[in-house]
């Protein structure tokens, strides 16, 4: 059935691609022909291509509809469908990213400057969420290290903090005190500079959909998904471990490191298995989400204590 009542199917949850596909399906049927004329012409999402990267996984990519329809973005609500329904309200133009703290040259970048800063790559990464699902997503972006070096960090800088936008009037979720706002995440500087850590500006060959963290987000593929802050406006270099939103909310359940680790269960559930969105059954979760090249970052650390 193609026609749904508006409240079953908020227009905001329909992606340009879905609209396009619906129009096409309509046009194929005689009955659809007349109705197709009433539908808004789908505005194609702005393309953003990247050159293929050697860091890419060759696994089956998670369908676009799951990547953009089943999200965590608490600023827009706590249900997995809320971001797709509400994130259209996020105002992404103009947008600036301020980089400051323990640096020689604090700077502010706009999106055009960020897009041109380094060659865009397409990186197909696995992402494992702490709640037990996983995805394979073709991101478009470049290593965060390319951005961080622009501001010449001081020797005293040991961590970076990522601060997401707060637009109270556009974000129904920030009325809830589930988390302290703004959403804050952080990495140790060597983690932030690791070549796998990505500054993402797009996915599936398009600019980032708003529910996925437009116009810029971090992606750290060996850590649980919540370490990847969305819609960030500020990066701050610090000498102390940042107090992240999830640690602040519940430090017994969420640690600063949050490396994917099947041997360290969440206090309320096992982390040994995961479900790939769009698939049935479960697969084994791998240490560091399978990105074993990051192991040297944690040499000598007890990963059960520093979870
Ligand atoms: N600002 C912000 N960033 C966020 C979140 C959030 O609620 N707010 N949720 C995190 C969580 S829990 C996950 S699993 C990933 C989900 O990213 P995705 O929706 O693109 O799959 O975003 C992370 N980044
Ligand atoms: Mo998550």
Image (cartoon, rainbow, N blue to C red):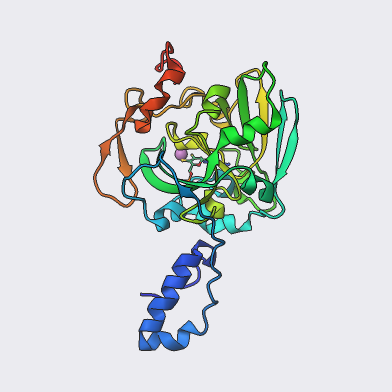
Residue drawn 46% across the image and 84% down it: 35
Provide residue 9's location: percent of width, then percent of height. 47, 67
Q: Is residue 55 left or right of residue 143?
A: left
Provide residue 186's location: percent of width, then percent of height. 58, 29
Q: Residue furthest left?
A: 281
Residue drawn 40% across the image and 54% down it: 66
Q: Is residue 90 left or right of residue 187?
A: right
Q: How many marks?
A: 0
Task: Say which of 284 and 52 sits in front.
Answer: 52
Task: Say which of 181 and 287 sits in front.
Answer: 287
When the figure is inspected, residue 199 is found, relative to residue 260, above or below; the finding is: below
When the figure is inspected, residue 135 is found, relative to residue 264, above or below; the finding is: below
When the figure is inspected, residue 118 is found, relative to residue 85, above or below; the finding is: above
User: Which quadrant does the C terminus fall into?
Assistant: top left
Residue drawn 70% across the image and 49% down it: 95
Q: Taking the image as drawn, is residue 82 in sight?
A: yes
Provide residue 295's location: percent of width, then percent of height. 40, 21
Task: Say which of 212 and 125 sits in front.
Answer: 125
Q: Taking the image as drawn, is residue 79 in sight?
A: no
Displayed quadrant of residue 232: top right
């Amino acid at each position: 059935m193609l026609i749904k009542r508006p409240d079953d199917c908020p227009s905001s949850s329909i992606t340009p691609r879905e609209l396009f596909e619906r129009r096409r399906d309509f046009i194929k049927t005689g009955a659809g022909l007349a109705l197709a004329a009433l539908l808004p012409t789908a505005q194609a999402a702005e393309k953003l291509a990247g050159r293929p990267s050697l860091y890419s996984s060759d696994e089956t990519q998670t369908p676009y509809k799951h990547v953009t329809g089943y999200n965590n973005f608490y600023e827009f609500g706590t249900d997995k469908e809320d971001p797709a329904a509400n994130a259209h309200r996020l105002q992404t133009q103009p947008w600036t990213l301020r980089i400051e703290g323990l640096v020689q040259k604090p700077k502010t970048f706009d999106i055009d400057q960020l897009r041109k800063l380094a060659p865009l790559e397409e990186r197909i990464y696995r992402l494992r969420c702490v709640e037990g699902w996983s995805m394979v997503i073709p991101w478009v972006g470049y290593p965060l290290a390319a951005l961080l070096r622009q501001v010449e960090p001081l020797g005293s800088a040991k961590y970076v903090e990522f601060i997401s936008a707060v637009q109270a009037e556009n974000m129904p979720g920030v009325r809830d005190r589930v988390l302290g706002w703004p959403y804050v995440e952080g990495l140790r500087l060597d983690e932030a500079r690791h070549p796998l850590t990505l500054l993402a500006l797009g996915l599936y060959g398009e600019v980032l959909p708003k529910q996925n963290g437009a116009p810029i987000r971090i992606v750290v593929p060996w850590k649980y998904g919540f370490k990847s802050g969305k819609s960030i406006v500020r990066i701050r270099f610090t000498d102390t471990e940042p107090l992240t939103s999830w640690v602040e909310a519940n430090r017994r359940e969420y640690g600063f490191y949050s490396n994917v680790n099947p041997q360290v269960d969440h206090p309320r559930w096992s982390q040994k298995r995961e479900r790939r969105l769009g698939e049935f059954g479960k697969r084994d979760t791998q240490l560091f989400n399978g990105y074993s090249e990051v192991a040297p970052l944690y040499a000598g650390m007890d990963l059960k204590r520093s979870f």
